[in-house]
Amino acid sequence: MASAFSKQETVFFDQMMAGYDDMLVAGRNVSIFNADPVVLERSQGTAFWRPTPYVSVAIDGAAGTDISSNFADVTQLSVPIGLGFNKTVPWAMTSDDLNDPQQRDRKLKSALQTLATQINMAVTNVAALQGTLVVKRTSAASGYDDLSLADALMVEQGLVGDVGRRVALVHARDYNSMAGNLAKPQTSANPKVNTAYEQAYVGQVSGFDTFKSDYTYRLTAAAGVTVTVNGANQYYTPKATSTASSGEIQNVDNRYQTLAVTVSSGTIKVGDRFTIAGVNAVHHISKQDTGQLKTFTVTAIISGSGGTGNIQISPPIISATGATQAEKEYQNVTATPANGAAITWLNTVSGNVLPFFDERAIELLPGRNGVDETLLANGGDYMRSTTELGVDVVLYKFFDINTKKFKYRADTRFGVGMTNPEMCGVVLFSQT
């Protein structure tokens, strides 16, 4: 068959795929949820609902205390993750081009690198745009001080478990700046100093595994934007399901809330980080006031670009205002914002963010591209490889006799989802 893959092509493809996971700097540092492709395809909207961690509250259970009214139903929250990314790299080569096999192999290598980059970018963007913890630094990246503040932020809110690994994806310029601060005391024979000096390697810092990234999301400044809360007692009540007027019961995504605001100047945009006056963060388990303002992320603009409007924020404002057991268990703030409460923007200078997260809070969902075997009988061929992480890559080849061109395309399909935005965040450098 004219378009069949040669032995050399097959060998090179297998060699490249053997190291494919190593190119997934971000992808291999999140949780992997491998689902049966048949079950996934038959799921509504090709989405799975993934559970979020339970949170429990304690009450006084001393002898003689009647707790009969405290046996409340459990509210299990969940979030949807679907196959939202279909990435392909197409190219064509003439029969003359293929006289030099190196050209074909170099192009295939480039295609696989590009597909790996797409997965890395998707993970990094989800972490950067949906994470809600914020460390604001007025100086450039330095290393320990930056990530120790991220560590303190997670610890004081009870977001550090005994099984989760924490990851920080650092833009190459910031990473090398951190390595430089570590490497400069060259009088030390400390191996940590030596590797920083010789290889610009940082490694683990304040409980985070750090990785140098060629890309992190660049968040532009919220400059000249003046906003206040429009309306008192805006809070969110978590619930596992909702019932439509037709009686249909559906799961509820509890990661977001609509907040009514008044915009006096400027324009709010997705990704902006902010605090609200009088709304402090609490420890998620003990519910004690941390003494620090809760940080929020704008995840969507629902209505309005000037004057009054509605924005979608994450996480939702869950206070002890309501009486439901879910509000008591998932409370994350000390109080609801007052009408007219000032919103303070944290991203005051444009720059690359440093995403940090507990690896359990972001999931990579590898997908699969189905292939009709009749392709082989109609002038085409394909090769498939599935990596250890479960990432599926298909390479197709087709010969067009009219143009004497061989058409290639490398495909991958995947989804990325954040199960808990309060276990993820960003460090903002050089802010005012």
Image (tube, rainbow, N blue to C red):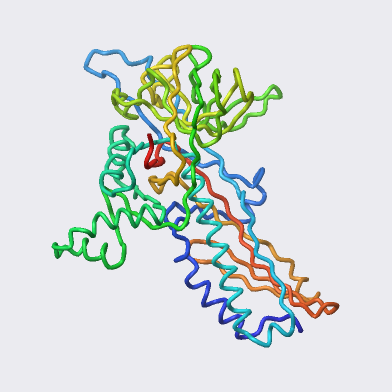
Q: Is residue 408 left or right of residue 55?
A: right
Q: Residue at x 55, y 17 (%)?
A: 262
Q: Is residue 93 left or right of residue 233?
A: right
Residue 72 can be seen, yes or no = no
Q: Is residue 140 above or below residue 196?
A: above
Residue 274 can be seen, yes or no = yes
* Quarter location, residue 173: bottom left
In depth, the one of 234 and 109 nearer the eye is 109
Q: Residue at x 44, y 15 (%)?
A: 341
Q: Is residue 344 above or below residue 321?
A: below
Q: Percent position (x, y) of residue 103? A: 62, 80
Q: Percent position (x, y) of residue 361? A: 43, 44
Q: Percent position (x, y) of residue 349? A: 44, 38
Q: Residue at x 49, y 46 (%)?
A: 218
Q: Is residue 57 left or right of residue 20?
A: left
Figure quadrant of the C terminus: top left
Q: Which residue appears farthest toward the bottom when viewing the image?
A: 99
Q: Is residue 335 above or below residue 132?
A: above
Q: Is residue 65 left or right of residue 218?
A: left
Q: Percent position (x, y) of residue 21? A: 47, 65
Number of numbered discs? 0
In depth, the one of 285 and 181 nearer the eye is 181
Q: Residue at x 74, y 70 (%)?
A: 373
* Quarter location, residue 157: top left
